[in-house]
């Protein structure tokens, strides 16, 4: 069974962040708040932990989890050949509900599943999430729900679905966003929206207009 940690006071928050960090170091799963929905996370560089995450959600290797980071500068440690239009989106929308699918660094020692040489990266706009990430490094994080069920927007929902599979649940109240991130594939010369989410195609393209670029919508 999981341990649940509130974050209402500074002391509680520190205790929660420390407990989550230690659980990740032990190769266990955690539930953490983000700016969109609650997520279930594991050390991105621990293949067994990532397999555990996929199993907890009822997913296979064909659906690899995104990676959350605490700083935009970490993108270049995980991805290569990031185009200029993608960097413009990062500058405008990170931290925030934007996930970018990039070419991954070939030297990375990890196994996120069948990624076909790509990695999906996001920097969440949630202080507690970033505090955890600052201590753990990049986490493989997917929405805290069983596959086919709605994403958890509070700790109760996450506990109901994943409480038996995770070690720590960090409870920061209702998720402020409640809508999943927008996913954009930036591996080509023109970006493609793979999943519609909290950021609309119009908002994204407003940023890219000055570069003479636009995204196509396949979401």
Image: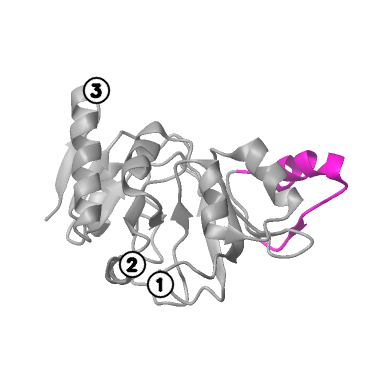
Of 59 and 208, nearer the camera is 208
Residue depth check, mark 1 versus mark 3: number of the one nearer the observer: 1
Q: Was residue 171 drawn as part of the magenta stretch in this picture? A: no
How far apart are the alpha carbons under marks 1 and 3? Answer: 35 Å
Alpha carbons under labels 3 and 2: distance apart: 30 Å
Residue occupied by mark 1: 111
Cα separation, mark 1 vs mark 2, equals 8 Å
**Percent x, y of residue 219:** 66, 61
User: With respect to residue 32, does 196 lie above or below?
Assistant: below
Q: Position of residue 137 (x, y in %)?
A: 37, 49
Region rendered in magenta: 199-219
Query: Considering the numbered disc 2 on the image, is that residue within a helix, a strand or a loop?
Result: helix
Q: Residue 87: tell me if it is visible.
A: yes
Q: Is residue 209 magenta?
A: yes
Q: Contact (CB < 8 A) between labels 3 and 2?
A: no
Q: Is residue 20 left or right of residue 109?
A: left
Q: How many marks?
A: 3
Q: Nearer the viewer, residue 87 or 195?
A: 87
Q: Quadrant of the N terminus?
A: bottom left
Q: Is residue 86 left or right of residue 166?
A: right
Vertical order, 30 against 33 (above or below) = below
- Quarter assignment of residue 33: top left
Q: Is residue 110 left or right of residue 183?
A: left
Identity of the residue drawn at 55% across and 65% down: 105
Disc ID at residue 10? 3
Q: Which circle's residue, 1 or 2, is located before the other in the chain?
A: 2
Where residue 172 sits: x, y (%)? Answer: 30, 34
- Return the x and y of residue 29 as percentages of the image width and height: 25, 57
């Amino acid at each position: 069974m999981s341990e649940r940690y509130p974050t209402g006071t500074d002391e509680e928050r520190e205790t929660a962040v420390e407990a989550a960090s230690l659980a990740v170091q032990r190769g266990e799963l955690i539930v953490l708040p983000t700016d969109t929905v609650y997520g279930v996370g594991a050390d991105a560089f621990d293949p067994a932990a990532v397999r555990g995450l996929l199993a907890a959600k009822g997913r296979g290797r064909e659906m690899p989890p995104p990676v959350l980071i605490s700083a935009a500068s970490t993108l270049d440690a995980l991805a290569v050949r990031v185009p200029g239009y993608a960097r413009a989106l990062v500058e405008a929308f990170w931290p925030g509900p934007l996930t970018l699918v990039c070419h991954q660094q070939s030297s990375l020692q990890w196994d996120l599943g069948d990624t076909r040489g790509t990695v999906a990266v996001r920097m969440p706009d949630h202080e507690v999430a970033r505090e955890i990430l600052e201590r753990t490094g990049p986490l493989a994080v997917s929405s805290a729900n069983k596959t086919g069920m709605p994403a958890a927007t509070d700790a109760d929902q996450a506990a109901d679905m994943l409480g038996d599979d995770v070690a720590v649940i960090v409870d920061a109240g209702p998720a402020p966003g409640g809508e999943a991130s927008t996913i954009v594939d930036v591996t080509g010369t023109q970006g493609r929206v793979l999943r519609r989410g909290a950021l609309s195609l119009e908002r994204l393209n407003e940023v890219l207009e000055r570069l003479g670029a636009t995204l196509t919508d396949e979401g």
